[in-house]
Amino acid sequence: MPQSNGTISFILNDREVSLSDIAPTTTLLDYLRLGRRLTGTKEGCAEGDCGACTVLVGRLAGDALVYESVNACIRFLGSLQATHVVTVEHLAGKDGTLHPVQQAMVDFHGSQCGFCTPGFVMSLYGLWLTNDDPSRAAIEKALQGNLCRCTGYEPIVRAAEAAAKERPSAIFDPITREREAITARLKALIPAETITIRQGENCLIVPADGDGLAAALAEHPGATVVAGSTDVGLWVTKQMRPINPVIFINGIAELQRIEETEAGLTIGAGVTYTAAFSALAKIHPGFGPLIDRIGGEQVRNMGTIGGNIANGSPIGDSPPPLIVLEATVTLSSTNGRRTLPLESFFIAYGKQDRQPGEFVESIFVPRLPAGDLFAAYKVSKRRDEDISALLGAFRLSVENGVVHSARVAFGGMAATPKRATTVESALIGKPWTEETIHAAQPAFETDYQPLTDWRATGEYRMLAAKNLLMRFFLESSGETAQLRRFEEAV
């Protein structure tokens, strides 16, 4: 397998960094605080939940330079090749003049204890760069991944609204001022061949392309493949799990493609939730509200749909709706490619139909036939930035008032994302009425035997699954008044 000189190179604020002595599990947060003494980036939770460690990472998307907020506590240095890392220290002018986002936080008393403030500033800065007139909903979405125990958020929201109106000259803002130069510098850092850094037993691999990834996995079939690290990061910071050797794939261009055709949508395994949002919501509007509730903005900017599938978690948010939409997954290796239905990919808890050396290359999501009904519902303790207790997805076709076909799938109800085939059979051929729903609800008990854990009891999950079927009926039937009564009752 070809190797480069064994260095990870990126730009940190205004300086290029090249590192050749890093471990695969070294986080960006530790490097910033311990290695560079950039202590504005804080450690709060070390699991991508509180946002105190938020920084911006600029990456090339084709010829465009895109900046996104990310959690430095679960972002590994190995994933930063050819990126621009921006910390809170980079925002103010050289004379100490605060950036409009920072000044607004002062003016509107958006900081009290101050610990979380740099993370809020960086999330709002990311919004400031892309939206000069954000709605309150857009501001709240940008702050989903930032937690504060002091201010109650209202002063921070007012600061965001005020900062959006302040647009000093392009010379002042560091990203606006340097965007063209940074773009050129990052293009020069794109690797032409696989980067490999060995340090004792540690092995860090950054393939330049899909062929390099296949070759790396052929040589290291047991390697941990890392895309967004929103799961793997916690394996390291919370579980102290060994993940060596590690292959970082977030820079592989072939895995970033989104291709829309008349048949449907092909999504590369490296496409983040943020990048996939518009395309998925366009052909399947029911996907939009679901993606908005996957983690916070930082998690959506890092996490990938391909990683969510490859990880095989029974509570992953994307598999149930993709299963009911009859999505397929394409796996690749040095032996070639194979495609299989997504629902067949999940075999048992922690086990997927992936052979040694194979990796998830892409997911294909078909369009819905005209008239089909589709919805996905997430149930969690917190509305935002929380793991699902269960997630239900529903797809039906109704002809002349009778259910012609039905697909129902849940996460959080079994050891894998799983279809409710008995429920489907109870619906098909029956009139699409409330009576049919009541008659079909007991079939959930044949399809699932949900476990009790700290997120929910088995009894709660079963009741919620039955109620989500009723909700789907009420929404698809336009029974809005009855739906409000139903929601009030549960």
Image (tube, rainbow, N blue to C red):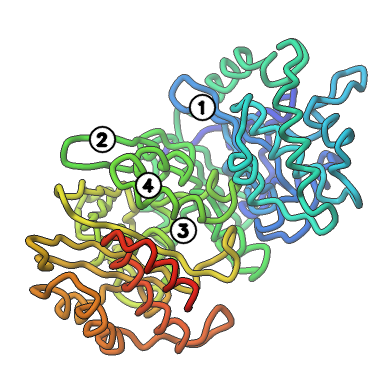
Q: Nearer the viewer, mark 3 or mark 1?
A: 1
In front here: 106 or 254? 106
Q: Which residue is mark 1?
A: 60
Which callout, 3 or 2, points at the residue further toward the start of the chain?
3
Taking the spot 32% from the left edge, 43% from the top edge, the residue there is 267
On the image, the x and y values in percent for residue 175 come to 68, 21
Residue at disc 3, secondary structure: loop
Q: Nearer the viewer, mark 3 or mark 2?
A: 2
Which callout, 2 or 1, points at the residue further toward the start of the chain?
1
Determine which quarter of the picture holds residue 28.
top right
Taking the spot 35% from the left edge, 35% from the top edge, the residue there is 257
Q: Which residue is mark 2?
A: 260
Which callout, 4 or 3, points at the residue further toward the start of the chain?
3
Q: Which residue is mark 4?
A: 269
On the image, the x and y values in percent for residue 465 come to 37, 77
Q: Which residue is mark 3?
A: 223
As measured in the structure, the alpha-carbon distance from the residue carrying label 4 to the one carrying label 3 is 17 Å
Q: Give the amino acid type for the residue marked by disc 4 in the picture.
A: Ala
